[in-house]
Amino acid sequence: MGEAAHLDRQERIKLIQTLRLALDDIGLYKTPIVAGVGANSTRETTQLAHDAAAAGADFVLVVLPGYYAGVLKANPTAMRKFFVDVAAASPVPVIIYNFPAVSAGIDLSSDDVVDIANAAPNICGIMLSCGNVGKLARITALVDNSSFKTLSGFIDFLLPSVAVGSAGAISPLPNVAPNFSFKLWRATQSLGSVADFHEAKELQGLASLGETALLKEGW
């Protein structure tokens, strides 16, 4: 749904409702909607999660508050409790959004993520926009991958992410190049030969260049 932080509460609701209607109109009844519900408090994040679910969202994406980031950085227990409390109150499954650039530099560690996942059964995955493939590998090695999925926050490291267990990516590039992005995804799932790997590597390079161009334009 784009940058949810730039929308007010009613705009968020209207956007989700409109998207659900548009998908249903073309027969995509089972296509899930992931709605961003980040806010600067547990209470507001929870309210936005309820709004999103009522409007038709199937999952909510939750980022740490950036306000008073210094306090949160110094108190990992509070960071973890934020996600656990939101997940307990959310009517739909929660995806953690780890994006230091929009949460005042807070970067959840793999230990943080595993602890949160173990404490909150309603958390079903994480979107890693920190670009740390090593962290992604550690998380996938330590969680139950049948109920908790790791996702790349950018498609420009999809191939190495899939190699260590990522379930996919949430990225800006598919918005403007959906067929190409799906081709890359298919290539990462079919690495049966050296030739397959080289094809995937070439596609990954093009995707990385394309996504970088989008990010330079403010996507």
Image (spheres, rainbow, N blue to C red):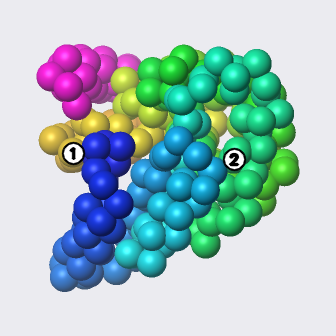
The magenta stretch spans residue 202: yes
Label 2 environment density (alpha carbons within 10 Å; few <14, some 14–19, many ≥20) = many
The residue lying at 58 percent from left, 36 percent from top is 64
Q: Position of residue 101 (x, y in %)?
A: 45, 21
Label 1 environment density (alpha carbons within 10 Å; few <14, some 14–19, many ≥20) = few
The magenta stretch spans residue 23: no
Secondary structure that dominates the magenta span:
helix
Please name the amino acid that badge 1 sits on: Asn
- Looking at the image, which is closer to me, 167 or 148? 148
- Give the residue pinned by disc 1: 175
Q: Position of residue 194 (x, y in %)?
A: 46, 22
Residue 150 lies left or right of residue 142; in this view the side is left
**From this viewpoint, is residue 16 visible?**
no
Residue at mark 1 to residue at mark 2: CA–CA distance: 28 Å
Q: Which residues are magenta?
A: 196-219
**From this viewpoint, is residue 150 visible?**
yes
Give the numbered dot on residue 114.
Answer: none
Image-quadrant location for residue 217: top left
Quadrant assignment for the C terminus: top left
Q: The residue tagged with tag 1: helix, strand or loop? A: helix
Please name the amino acid that badge 2 sits on: Phe
- Looking at the image, which is closer to me, 195 or 151? 151
Q: Position of residue 171 (x, y in %)?
A: 35, 38
Q: Earlier in the sequence, mark 1 or mark 2?
A: 2
Residue 4 lies left or right of residue 110; in this view the side is left
Residue 167 lies left or right of residue 4; in this view the side is right
Image-quadrant location for residue 143: top right
Above or below, 211 relative to 95: above
Q: Position of residue 84 (x, y in %)?
A: 75, 51
The residue lying at 79 percent from left, 25 percent from top is 75
Give the numbered dot on residue 83.
Answer: 2
The residue lying at 37 percent from left, 69 percent from top is 31
